[in-house]
Image (cartoon, rainbow, N blue to C red):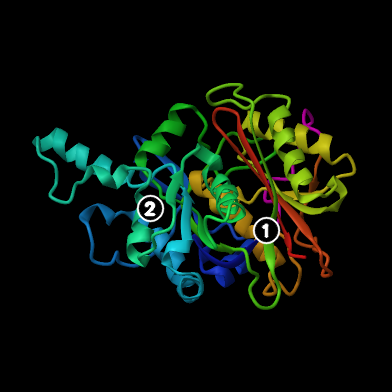
Amino acid sequence: MTAYLNALGVICALGRGKREVARNLFAGDCSGMRDEAGWVPERSLPVAAVRGELAAIPPGPPWQHTRNNQLLLEAALQIRPDIDSAIQTYGRDRIGIVLGTSTSGIEEASQGLAQYLREQQFPAAYDYQQQELAAPANFLADWLQLSGPTYVISTACTSSARALISAQRLLDLGICDAVLCGGVDSLCKLTLNGFSALDAVSAQRCNPFSVNRNGINIGEAAVLFVMSKQPAEGHSIALLGSGASSDAYHISAPEPSGRGALQAMRKALGRANLQPGQIAYLNLHGTATAHNDAMESQAVATLFPAGVPCSSSKPMTGHTLGAAGALEAAFCWLSLSDGNSEQALPPHIWDGQPDPALPPLQWVTPGTRLASIAPRYLMSNSFAFGGNNVSLIIGDAP
């Protein structure tokens, strides 16, 4: 069954809303990546934060008051009319919520624990439920008064890509008629210090697939799609195929040959009934770490011997962790949308110095254009700790 992606709410370092995000994405705007101190002791690091005030959490339980939920609320407010239309069409018990996250409200919980260690007393607003992984989905269900299946998937950096797969499954099984799906992750000290301890964080803007690459930047984002069995009026975009694999090679390092990544991409193509040559663009996981980029380039070169236009968008957004899969699927959605009148694609931002140890890939430049004639098929990769691999295919719906 086709899973139509009928609406998109998005907020990240590129901006708020699909128009602003698309404009800055296709322009290759990296201005949202800025050096900040205070996240990691004695280090100033580039982070891709959302700037400015966020929407206030509506009155409700204290545990709902987290930055993570504020980002999610911002994305939801952008598509509130579409959500209300789905509620009116299908009913509150036929709409599910599936989100991906890795942080939830851990930053607020960490601040509460820090106060406890100092003063032997938690702050009045502290509640353990802030940091529960289910918190963002529960918040959204409470706010919208939805009673369909509501849950969160947390598989590190594939979380929200898996959320889209899971949402489609709910439609296929007839459990839901529409699903609010996507992901949200906010900046927090725990994440930045954890990746810093792994020597995986770059002190400069990340440089994917360059011989000079030396690590990731962290970002934050919220993405929310309305996925349904029925297309919206006009041009329809859908999740046409998905593939997942788990090579379980190592707790944090990818399997060097790219075997698991290749399996996920091949599964996605098989489910979409497509050949590699029909993919018009590939959004790479492209974290700019030595091992991930080496593995991914091997897998891509094997699957696409004739080449495929590809790029990593992480120099513009940072690695948004649990939100990354949905965010980069959103970039494919924006590339296909009617608002992209110039048929632009996200450019590959790097220093232009290829790693001679990696197979060469076909990079998207500012002049690269997507065909204007449908059907067009775009792929997005997400890879996570533990050998967890997901590939999605977003395309013009038949």
Provide the secondary structure element on which disc 1 rests.
Answer: helix
Which part of the image, by quadrant, shows the C terminus? Answer: bottom right
CB atoms of marks 2 and 1 within 8 Å: no
Magenta stretch mostly in which secondary structure?
loop
Instruction: Tell me residue 36's x, y (percent).
Output: 40, 48
Give the extent of the magenta segment: 347-359
Magenta span contains residue 353: yes
Mark 2–mark 1 Cα distance, whole angstroms, equals 24 Å
Residue lying at the far front of the rendered structure: 174
* Left or right: 300, with 247 as reference point: right
Magenta span contains residue 116: no
Quadrant position of residue 44:
top left
From this view, report whether residue 256 is shown above or below residue 116. Answer: above
| Residue displayed at 52% across by 69% down | 17
* Left or right: 279, with 165 as reference point: right
Numbered tag placed on residue 332 in the rendering: 1
Residue at numbered disc 2: 136
Amino acid at circle 1: Cys
Q: Is residue 108 visible?
A: no
Crowding at dot 1, Cα within 10 Å, few <14 / some 14-19 / many 20+, comes out as: many
Quadrant position of residue 300:
top right
Q: Nearer the viewer, residue 286 or 261?
A: 261
Instruction: Tell me residue 69's x, y (percent).
Output: 36, 56
| Residue displayed at 82% across by 38% down | 303
Quadrant position of residue 133:
top left
Crowding at dot 2, Cα within 10 Å, few <14 / some 14-19 / many 20+, comes out as: many
